[in-house]
């Protein structure tokens, strides 16, 4: 699905990623953990194609294609979805409008006709249940005045509608209380499938109790310093990030 | 008869024309005109040295010679009047061409009970007292040269009067058109709208021209909102590409009245709006919304002034501008809370979106408070599109151009949400979308 080789990237000229290697197979869920400033969010945004995040070295291959050949929106239409750490408030643009525009952009890309109004409404109602949101949500401006939990649920709603093949969840747990976390995790889990891979970026192990990953990678100073199974997250929880510190120093050196 | 925008030329024109104006036998009206001419003689036309005209240089207008009685190509006008119809608006139509009321082009044959709507000159001729009681009452004493000019030559325009307790269900659409050509017409319509106690009406003022020729609209509208009365007035400016438009709108409100004024400036080379609302009696509420959509070298200046005279009044003011190319907008919003206006509740916002490096906005929200128990806020922001929002939309599969179109459209469109008439809103939506090149994707976006 996704192969990252020796990825180096800078943000406003500052090197952040310094040689990332990752292999994400079909249907796999990979957790990326690491302390603040380790490059987790940078990695997520490089995959999505954010401007200002400059790749200086290395490759990312997605479904056999060079990812860097694709513009942000083309990546999205090819099935990459980024759930934002800080979802953007957009006054004057309703959720339902965005969902419709986004879904139809993807369909057009795949050579499918636009969803008709009835079909769309049926689909969106079904997905709303997944994240326990009410209909009226649809008619509010995107994320405007939403609570932290509502914003994150809205991200998952969009993901559910777009049915990506690769979902990157950037600190989806940040700012969530335990109830909201469970709703979000349930939403994500219901979207797990053999064709859909996920990268779950998180600072804390807590989220991984609910979204159980197949693999865990620890990022420090722009490199993967440790990889393992889901038990790695528990070790991190018990020992803290200083536990991988020695490896991190070695990696930096 | 031609005239230049200087006092001498205006006085000469007045000497030769004043005898032909409507109601010369009415001493009060002649006196009004003479007084106005004297005021003009005293103040002259504003220059950039006047604080209120610092950012708007009228030399673009004063370099031309204008014709006060330009001839009208009636056949062409009839076609344009017809094509300017907004389907589904279902309005009573009053058509003004070059400042003169045209009954032949208007659609006001069957007016509902309690509504007078027609030409001002006809009204002066048939019932001068009904005009004398109101005309000039809403104008400030210290008006500028343009409003004095309108006053000095006051002759025709629109007269609307809604009797007490009457709700006019259909909107009244006033179409101000220009027939230009070899000469540059000066159109000076005067509009009076009187909404008596407990009455209610929606008025749509449309200034329309597809002319590429030079002309000047110097319009003055006065609106009187009686106790418990309600008015929505939507002023849509779609003037010609070389047109000047100086538009005064003066609103007086009595107890518990409610006025919503939407000023939408779309086309015209130089637009200057002076909007003044006076909350004279307790419990009055006024909402002022504005949108200035500029491109090319357009210049759009909105001067607003709200007087909180009485206590317990509410004012809400939200003005937006979206500026591309080398266009320029000016916003000067003054809220004055007079000393007896306790419990005033006032909010004012001006937000500008600059789409080009060469666009410019000069904004000046101004609050003067002479009472001590009030709730007032004001502010201004100027910025560009939020790049994070563009990115956000793109990560959902929307191409960059559409993403920018959506965000710009959303910004502009939020200025028209108080326009209650759906057909009119849809029309303006389309105009905004076309002008911004916001793309088909923004269709069906409004909610």
Image (tube, helix red, strand yellow):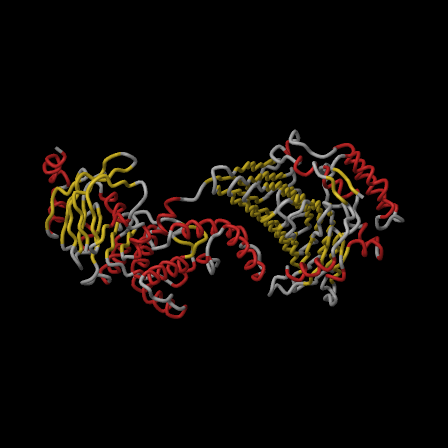
Residue B206 vs residue B172, the one in the foreground: B206
Give the quadrant of residue A97: bottom left
Residue A195 visible? The answer is: yes
Q: Is residue B383 above or below residue B127?
A: above
Asked if residue B276 can be seen in this view, the reply is no
Q: Nearer the viewer, residue A242 or A199?
A: A199
Q: Position of residue B408 (x, y in %)?
A: 46, 49
* Location of residue A111 in the rendering, given as x and y in whole percent from the top left corner: 33, 64
Above or below for B55 versus A214: above
Q: How many marks?
A: 0
Look at the image and tell me in which quarter the C terminus of chain A lies: top left
The residue nearer to you, when weighing B349 against B226, is B349
Find the residue positioned furthest to the front. B182
Q: Quick check: A16 left or right of A138? A: left
Nearer the observer, B211 or A170: B211
**Residue sitting at the far top:** B49
Q: Quadrant of residue A98?
A: bottom left
On screen, B160 above or below A238? Answer: below
Q: Position of residue B383 (x, y in %)?
A: 46, 40
Query: Is B322 on the left or on the right of B142, as rendered?
Result: left
Q: Position of residue A251 (x, y in %)?
A: 12, 37
Q: Residue at x 56, y 37 (%)?
A: B365
Would residue B360 appear left or right of B188 to someone viewing this image?
Answer: left
Of the 4 image quadrants, the one containing the N terminus of chain A is bottom left
Side of A197 where B310 appears, left or right: right
């Amino acid at each position: 699905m996704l192969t990252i080789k020796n990825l180096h990237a800078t943000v406003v000229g500052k090197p952040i990623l310094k040689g990332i290697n990752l292999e994400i197979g079909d249907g796999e869920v990979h957790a990326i953990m690491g302390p603040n400033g380790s490059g987790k969010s940078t990695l997520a945004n490089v995959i999505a194609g954010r401007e200002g995040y400059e790749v200086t070295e290395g490759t990312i291959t997605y479904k056999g294609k060079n990812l860097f050949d694709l513009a942000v929106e083309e990546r999205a239409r090819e099935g990459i979805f980024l759930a934002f750490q800080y979802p953007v408030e957009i006054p004057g643009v309703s959720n339902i409008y965005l969902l419709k525009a986004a879904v139809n952009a993807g369909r057009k890309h795949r050579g499918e006709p636009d969803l008709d109004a009835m079909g769309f409404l049926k689909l969106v109602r079904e997905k709303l249940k997944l994240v326990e949101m009410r209909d009226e949500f649809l008619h509010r401006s995107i994320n405007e005045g939403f609570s932290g939990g509502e914003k994150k649920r809205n991200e998952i709603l969009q993901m559910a509608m777009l049915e990506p093949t690769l979902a990157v969840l950037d600190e989806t747990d940040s700012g969530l209380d335990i109830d909201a976390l469970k709703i979000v995790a349930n939403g994500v889990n219901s979207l797990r499938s053999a064709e859909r891979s996920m990268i779950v970026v998180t600072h804390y192990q807590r989220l991984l109790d609910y979204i159980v990953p197949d693999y865990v990678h620890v990022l420090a100073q722009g490199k993967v310093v440790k990889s393992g199974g889901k038990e790695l997250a528990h070790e991190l929880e018990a020992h803290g990030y200083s536990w991988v510190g020695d490896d991190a120093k070695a990696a930096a050196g | 008869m031609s005239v230049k925008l200087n006092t001498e030329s205006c006085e000469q024109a007045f000497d030769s024309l004043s005898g032909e104006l409507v109601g010369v036998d009415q001493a009060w009206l002649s006196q009004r005109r003479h007084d106005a001419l004297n005021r003009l003689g005293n103040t002259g036309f504003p220059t950039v040295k006047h604080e209120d005209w610092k950012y708007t240089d009228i030399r673009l207008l004063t370099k031309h010679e204008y014709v006060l009685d330009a001839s009208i190509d009636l056949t062409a006008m009839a076609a344009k009047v017809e094509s300017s119809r907004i389907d589904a608006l279902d309005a009573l139509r009053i058509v003004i061409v070059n400042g003169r009321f045209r009954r032949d082009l208007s659609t006001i044959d069957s007016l509902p009970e309690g509504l007078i709507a027609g030409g001002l000159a006809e009204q002066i001729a048939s019932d001068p007292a009904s005009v004398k009681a109101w005309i000039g009452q809403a104008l400030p004493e210290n008006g500028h040269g343009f409003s004095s000019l309108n006053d000095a030559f006051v002759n025709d325009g629109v007269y609307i009067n809604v009797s007490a307790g009457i709700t006019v269900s259909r909107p009244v659409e006033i179409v101000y058109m220009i027939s230009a050509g070899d000469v540059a017409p000066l159109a000076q319509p005067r509009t009076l709208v009187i909404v008596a106690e407990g009455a209610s009406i929606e008025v749509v003022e449309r200034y329309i021209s597809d002319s590429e020729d030079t002309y000047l609209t110097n319009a003055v509208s006065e609106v009187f909102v009686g106790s418990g009365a309600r008015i929505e007035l939507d002023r849509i400016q779609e003037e010609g590409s070389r047109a000047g438009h100086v538009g005064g709108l003066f609103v007086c409100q009595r107890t518990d009245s409610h006025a919503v004024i939407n000023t939408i400036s779309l086309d015209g080379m130089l637009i200057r709006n002076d909007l003044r609302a006076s909350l004279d009696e307790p419990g009055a509420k006024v909402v002022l919304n504005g949108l200035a959509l500029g491109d090319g070298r357009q210049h759009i200046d909105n001067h607003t002034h709200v007087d909180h005279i009485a206590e317990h009044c509410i004012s809400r003011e939200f003005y937006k501008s979206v500026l591309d190319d080398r266009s320029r907008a000016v916003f000067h919003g003054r809220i004055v809370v007079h000393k007896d206006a306790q419990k005033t509740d006032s909010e004012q916002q001006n937000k500008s979106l600059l789409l080009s490096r060469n666009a410019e906005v000069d904004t000046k929200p101004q609050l003067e408070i002479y009472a001590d128990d009030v709730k007032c806020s004001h502010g201004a922001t100027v910025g560009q599109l939020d790049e994070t929002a563009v990115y956000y939309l793109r990560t959902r599969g929307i191409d960059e151009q559409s993403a920018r179109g959506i965000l710009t459209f959303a910004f502009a469109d939020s200025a028209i949400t108080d326009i209650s008439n759906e057909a009119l809103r849809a029309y303006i939506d389309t105009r905004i979308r076309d002008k911004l090149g916001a793309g088909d994707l923004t269709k069906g976006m409004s909610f």
